[in-house]
């Protein structure tokens, strides 16, 4: 193997449901997967927040993170992410304060600015569509709760969060990178295909980064799908179920549970379905171990990122786990990284 991945690898799991399996099984699979990821040496294991999505069981990330942390002992555990517009900042601070108090030195606070994708979901959550516009202000208020209390609410304290330091990661697209830089937080940005816009956003984040109580130095995590198998064809097939789910959601407005790849490949798709399906297959890293190692090594060299966050879904759970095992080998991950992470403003990663 000519190339190695020189940065740590981490996992984001969305608790995807599979046809014929209930949401409870998907959540238990997530917890079991976290134990596997820890044994393989992945640095972090994060869970996500989705609401009213039939194909995703993970709707309460801090609750699920507690289950994951309780089932593991060394790997860092966090959220990718809690969608800040959906929640009161004091409640978010309290939840992460509880997590950090129970599992000191192992908790990451990944925060996003998305709101529910339909009017009905937004109303049910009490969130407005334009709530994303106030994300920077919400982020600053959240930091105040940990520092000693939000200035807007005198004599109110978010316990047990007050005085604790939980690493903050801002999940961002191109524009959101500026928010992370201004806040002095770590940046998580999608784009394993290495688009020019992604590279430019990373560079802008580094140049605009302001040291803060959260971090002394910029820290960039690049996120995306990676599939590794014995052959290029097998790796490509791992991406098929999720690509079809995306195409299905684009044409029907419902994000479905995953189905087997062979079923998708046997379908006669409409022109519109085919267009969305093929688009969903693009922009991912997949192939044999040598091919993926070379592509990721080149990507890290081009972007200078500090870490890679892999979030891959497929119907065949054993093939998916095999992909993560192969990927771990590419970084020489023979055992746990341990509880290291950017938990203090010293810049330790």
Image (spheres, rainbow, N blue to C red):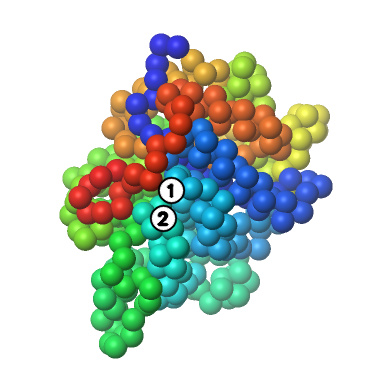
Residue 201 makes an appearance in the image: no
Name the residue located 41 percent from the left edge and 11 percent from the top edge: 2
Q: Quadrant of the C terminus?
A: top left
346 with respect to 325 (left or right): left
Residue 212 is situated, as x and y percent measured from the top left of the image, at 20, 58
* Residue on which disc 1 sits: 76
Instruction: Tell which of 264 and 146 is nearer to you.
Output: 146
Name the residue located 49 percent from the left edge and 70 percent from the top edge: 86
Res. 32 image quadrant: top right
Give the class, few, some or many, for how many residues have Cα within 10 Å of label 2's Cα (few <14, many ≥20): many
Q: Is residue 278 above or below residue 255?
A: above
Residue 258 makes an appearance in the image: yes
Task: Give SS at disc 1.
Answer: strand
145 with respect to 231 (left or right): left
56 with respect to 65 (left or right): right
Q: Which mark is residue 157?
A: none
Task: Give SS at disc 2.
Answer: strand
Separation of marks 2 and 1 at Cα, in angstroms: 6 Å
* Residue on which disc 2 sits: 107
Residue at the bottom extreme of this rendering: 155
Evaluate if marks 2 and 1 touch, with contact meaning CB atoms under 8 Å apart: yes
| Mark sitting earlier along the chain (2/1) | 1
Name the residue located 68 percent from the left edge and 44 percent from the top edge: 245
Residue 230 is situated, as x and y percent measured from the top left of the image, at 62, 17
Give the class, few, some or many, for how many residues have Cα within 10 Å of label 1's Cα (few <14, many ≥20): many
């Amino acid at each position: 193997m000519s190339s190695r991945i020189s940065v740590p690898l981490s996992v984001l799991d969305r608790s995807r449901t599979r046809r014929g399996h209930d949401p409870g099984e998907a959540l238990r699979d997530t917890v079991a997967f976290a134990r596997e990821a820890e044994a393989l040496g992945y640095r972090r294991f994060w869970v996500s927040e989705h609401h009213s999505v039939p194909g995703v069981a993970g709707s309460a990330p801090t609750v699920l993170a507690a289950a994951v942390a309780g089932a593991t002992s060394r790997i860092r555990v966090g959220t990718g992410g809690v969608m800040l517009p959906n929640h009161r900042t004091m409640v978010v601070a309290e939840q992460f304060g509880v997590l950090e108090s129970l599992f000191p030195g192992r908790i990451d606070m990944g925060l996003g600015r998305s709101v529910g994708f339909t009017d009905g979901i937004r109303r049910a959550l009490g969130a407005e569509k334009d709530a994303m516009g106030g994300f920077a202000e919400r982020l600053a208020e959240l930091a105040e709760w940990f520092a000693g209390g939000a200035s807007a609410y005198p004599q109110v304290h978010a316990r047990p969060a007050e005085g604790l330091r939980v690493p903050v990661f801002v999940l961002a697209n191109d524009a959101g990178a500026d928010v992370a830089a201004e806040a002095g937080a770590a940046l998580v940005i999608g784009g394993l295909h290495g688009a020019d816009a992604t590279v430019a956003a990373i560079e802008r984040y580094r140049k605009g980064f302001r040291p803060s109580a959260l971090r002394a130095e910029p820290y960039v995590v690049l996120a995306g799908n990676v599939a590794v198998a014995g052959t290029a064809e097998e790796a490509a097939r791992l991406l098929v179920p999720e690509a079809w789910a995306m195409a299905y959601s684009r044409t029907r407005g419902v994000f479905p549970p995953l189905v087997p790849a062979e079923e998708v490949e046997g379908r006669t798709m409409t022109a519109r379905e085919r267009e969305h399906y093929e688009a969903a297959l693009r922009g991912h890293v997949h192939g044999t171990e040598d091919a993926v190692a070379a592509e990721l090594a080149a990507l890290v060299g081009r972007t200078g990122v500090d870490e890679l966050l892999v979030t891959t879904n497929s119907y065949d759970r054993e093939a998916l786990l095999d992909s993560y095992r192969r990927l771990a080998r590419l970084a020489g991950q023979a055992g746990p990284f341990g509880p290291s992470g950017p938990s203090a403003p010293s810049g330790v990663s």
